Image: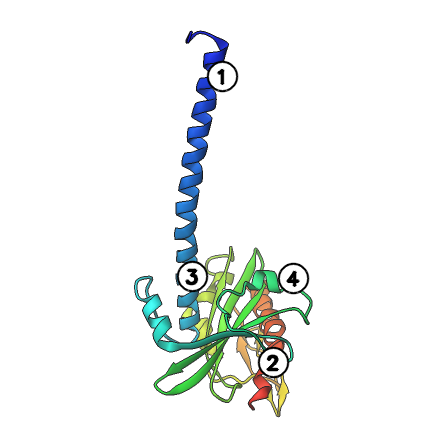
Amino acid sequence: MNKESNQYTLIYASVLVIIVAVALAFTSQVLNERQKKNEAVDKMRQILRAVNIDATAKDADAKYAEFITASYSVNETGEKVSDDGFSVELVKEVKKSAKERQYPVFEANIEGEAYYIMALRGAGLWGPLWGYISVSADRNTVYGSDFSHQGETPGLGAEISTAEFCQQFTGKQLFVNGEFKSIAVVKKGKSLKDQDYVDGISGGTITSVGVHDMLLNSLSGYEAFLKNEK
């Protein structure tokens, strides 16, 4: 074949395109599997942090299997609707109507004590907020929490992911005299009389409000579940 011909150039270019496309597809597939695994490991670590257990990327699988005894999802009436809460994607669930939405629950057993972990999703100043919060066997008293964000300002709103902020929630109660109240996030120096609260982030007012709303909106969907065994 004449290498100077248009036909040769067309064939040569087509072959190169096919080879590159196959290579890219293969690389994408390999990286996609690895990315999904990394996301799953990160999710396990967040869930474990909500019950005050630190895990590395290497031991997250083992610790999750050791401490998380059950994973399922419930609906707004507190009924179990799925035996797999781990695969529930809140980013999709929050777009559904309240009746269709699934709320993931993770049960943990630590030194013989039962804990219930619930998932949270909300919005901050620059992007989404998410996290997990756990309650003791009374389904009321907070045992631990973990918050994450996408794009909040370092030193300001991003402080919600620090241990100092998360530890404020320990011991707080979601119900007051049997009525669901959630936990308020208030400006430092302010207080509330009718519900438990924590101090917000100095200079991160919008993010603090985002956490406040995320807790109220997300946990209200678990109200029936939390009351079922009270």
Q: Which residue is mark 1?
A: 10
Give the spatial CA distance, label 4 vs label 3: 22 Å
Label for residue 40?
3
Q: Residue at x 44, y 74 (%)?
A: 50
Q: CA distance from mark 1 to mark 4?
A: 48 Å
Q: What type is the residue that disc 4 sits on?
A: Lys
Can you give x and y, in whole percent of width and height, for residue 151 in the image? 51, 55
Residue kind at label 2, given as amino acid type: Gly
The picture places residue 133, in percent across and down from the top left corner, at 49, 75
Amino acid identity at mark 3: Ala
Three-letter code, disc 1 = Leu
Note whether 38 is above or below 209 in the view shown.
above
Q: Please give the residue where the numbered disc 4 appears in the rendered image.
A: 95
Residue 59, label in figure: none
Count neighbours of disc 3 (C-alpha within 10 A) and say few if under 14, some if 14 to 19, many if 20 or more.
some
- The residue where tag 2 is placed is 78
**Residue placed farthest to the left in the image?**
58
**Residue name at image x 55 percent, y 89 percent:** 229
Q: Dots 4 and 2: beta carbons under 8 Å?
A: no
Q: Does label 1 or label 4 sit earlier along the sequence? A: 1
Mark 3 touching mark 1, by CB under 8 A? no
Mark 2 and mark 3: span between their CA atoms? 26 Å
